[in-house]
Amino acid sequence: MVRWRGIFRAITPAIVFFAILPALIIYVCLGQFGFTTDSLLAIIIFFQTYIVMLQVEIALRQTAVFEAEYEPALKVDVNTVALAIGGATNVHQNISLKNVGSYLAYNVFVGLVNGTTRKPIVERTESQAPRTLGPGDSLDIISIDEPEYTDMNIEMNVLYVNSLNETRDAKFVKFPKSTEFMILRTPRTRPGILLKSLEDIKLAHTAIKWSRTLRKVKNRSQ
């Protein structure tokens, strides 16, 4: 079922920029000055401004895509190690951060937090961590005994500087009863206003189209 309130909230900026505002400009120009050369020129300049804004926003999007290509690809590796000590086997998990991408990460800083108590588990300062984590390089973080590791809720926060000298962050989370870390990506704001509004209209149209299709399929199956 389509949530009309959410769709209306998403397309409200588009309605303002592409319906209400143009209609208001046209009304003011023609209402105040009539159908004259000056009023038509003002309307043309207004729409040309929209075109220039769209071109600028497209350029910003292309810049964002270009910057994303120079990001390192970080992942958390968890390796099980078993040591036999005095007839008993001690099993622990070695946690490391690895760069599996093609670009470097500079000034890496890693902090581990217990997701339940919100207390730090271990932290590495910039002086303790290598200044560069190149492609294929790994950084050992901590070793935790079993079964303590499996029951823990761990958050790993990573700060680094990419190849464009911009500070970035990444967050990895391990939930209780799980052995692997998953990355939590912070959604980045899409640059622009007009372009984002057009994309929201397209998404709203797609949602409505799918809702109608699912309704037809449901009616046929009954």
Image: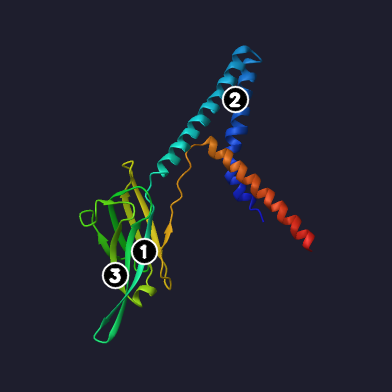
Distance, label 3 to label 1, CA atoms, is 12 Å
In the image, taking residue 79 as reference, residue 209 lies left or right, namely: right
Residue at 29%, 59% in the rendered image: 139
**Is the residue under label 1 in contact with that under label 3 (CB below 8 Å)?**
no
Residue at 59%, 20% in the rendered image: 44
Distance, label 3 to label 2, CA atoms, is 65 Å
Residue 108 pos. (x, y %) = 28, 53
Residue 219 pos. (x, y %) = 78, 59
Residue 28 pos. (x, y %) = 61, 22
Q: Which residue is mark 1?
A: 77
Q: Which residue is mark 3?
A: 143
The amino acid type of the residue labelled 2 equals Ile
Kind of element beneath mark 1: strand
| Of residues 201 and 56, the one drawn nearer to the viewer in this rendering | 56
Of labels 1 and 2, the one closer to you: 1
Residue at 48%, 30% in the rendered image: 56
In the image, taking residue 126 as reference, residue 222 lies left or right, namely: right
Residue at 42%, 58% in the rendered image: 183
Q: Which residue is mark 2?
A: 25
Of labels 3 and 1, the one closer to you: 1
Whether residue 96 is situated above or below residue 32 in the rendered picture: below
Within 10 Å of the Cα at label 1, are there few (<14), some (14-19), or many (20+) other Cα atoms?
some
The amino acid type of the residue labelled 3 equals Ser
Q: Quadrant of the C terminus?
A: bottom right
**Is the residue under label 2 in contact with that under label 1 (CB below 8 Å)?**
no
The amino acid type of the residue labelled 1 equals Asp
Q: Earlier in the sequence, mark 3 or mark 2?
A: 2
- Numbered label attached to residue 43: none
Whether residue 213 is situated above or below residue 61 in the rendered picture: below
